[in-house]
Image (cartoon, rainbow, N blue to C red):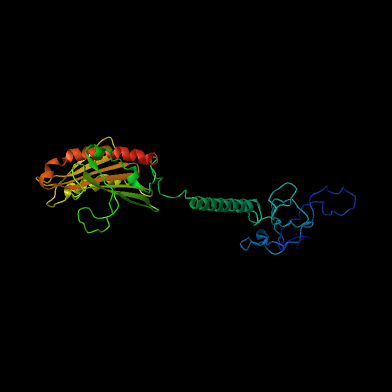
Amino acid sequence: MSNTGDQNTPFSAPQPPGYGPAPAPGSGAAPGPAPGPAAQPPVPPQPQPYAQPNPYAQQGPPGFQAPSPAPPPASPQGPGGYGYPAPSTPGAPTGSPGMPGAAYGAPPGGGPGDGAGRGVSGWLWALGGAVAAAAVGGSVLFATGAFSSEPDPVLKGYAYRDDLCAATSLSPFENAHYEAKPSSGSTTGTGTGSSAPPNPQHSGAQLNSMDSMWCNITLTPQSTGTSIYPTTWLYTAATLHKKADPAPEFADMYRAYEKQETSVRYRVEPVSGIGDEAFLVSRTDAGSNSAYVILAARDGWLTYQSTWTSYTAGSNAAKAPSSSEIATMLETSAKETLQRLKNGGR
């Protein structure tokens, strides 16, 4: 047989009353549900794993009634009704003071809206926000060029000049009795009346990666007349590199002259006192009537080259300057020209 309030088991004992004071003896008042928290929406009854009969229990003789097993520890009762454990309400922490407990035998842990779920959700939101902030910050840095691998050019105050000839120092050559005679409008010594290029002649270009300047000057010995065809040229070039540092390749560019396997031989020597590094390249042809000398210098990201080319024949060959004298003139001119380029061409 079963008592009132039993759940499918003949051996369950009556459940103690819910929260609230027990009725006084002899009052005759029937025990009612104790006041508790606000009524929760009805929840379907939970299956009770402990309410199933034990198929392996020992059976007694007919008429024998086994003693009732001790009831499980009673959970605090809520608004679920007298004698029935109230199922746990989703979203309510188990075992909180003043809140109904979980049904006996229900699995531990909270529902989908408990504190742990909120903690995980908040952690994911924080992670997503950090990723979004990092993406926005990276976009700003990329747009402003903070991730650019291009180094800043080291120009050391050098500036572009549209007329390099105006900044080129000719004092060392004039002291050696050379002069740059202006063009007379016809090719000197030919008598054809054809127009001659200006002397000196300059050019230049400002580009995205570099600014380049050139100057070509024809030099004539002062002791010769105007009918003598000029045989000496001074070619000067300066480049302001704005995207790439020329230092790693600068020295090898001129040392390669010594590696040329031709009939013309060159000697390469380092020169001190001009920029960060400088080199002198000279031809070593024995008995030649021509001279070819290069002075190359690098100062920061500026490269400079001055080239002397001359050819002397007949009685004038003995008066031609030697390679060492030409080198001295080029070095002096380079120092003064670079100083002018750094001070705005003055």
> Residue 149, relative to residue 4: is it above or below?
above
**Residue 83 image offset from top left, x and y in percent:** 77, 56
**Residue closer to the observer: 171 or 252:** 171
Residue 49 appears in the rendering: yes
> Residue 276, relative to residue 262: is it above or below?
above
- Where, quadrant-wise, is the N terminus in this rendering? bottom right
**Residue closer to the observer: 217 or 61:** 217
Q: How many marks?
A: 0
**Residue 325 image offset from top left, x and y in percent:** 19, 38
Q: Residue furthest right?
A: 27
Q: Is residue 161 left or right of residue 94?
A: left
Residue 245 appears in the rendering: no
Q: Which residue sits at x=18%, y=38%?
A: 324
Q: Is residue 210 left or right of residue 194?
A: right
> Residue 303, relative to residue 51: is it above or below?
above
**Residue closer to the observer: 166 or 148:** 166
**Residue 123 image offset from top left, x and y in percent:** 59, 51
**Residue 328 image offset from top left, x and y in percent:** 22, 37
- Where, quadrant-wise, is the C terminus in this rendering? top left
Q: Is residue 168 left or right of residue 123?
A: left
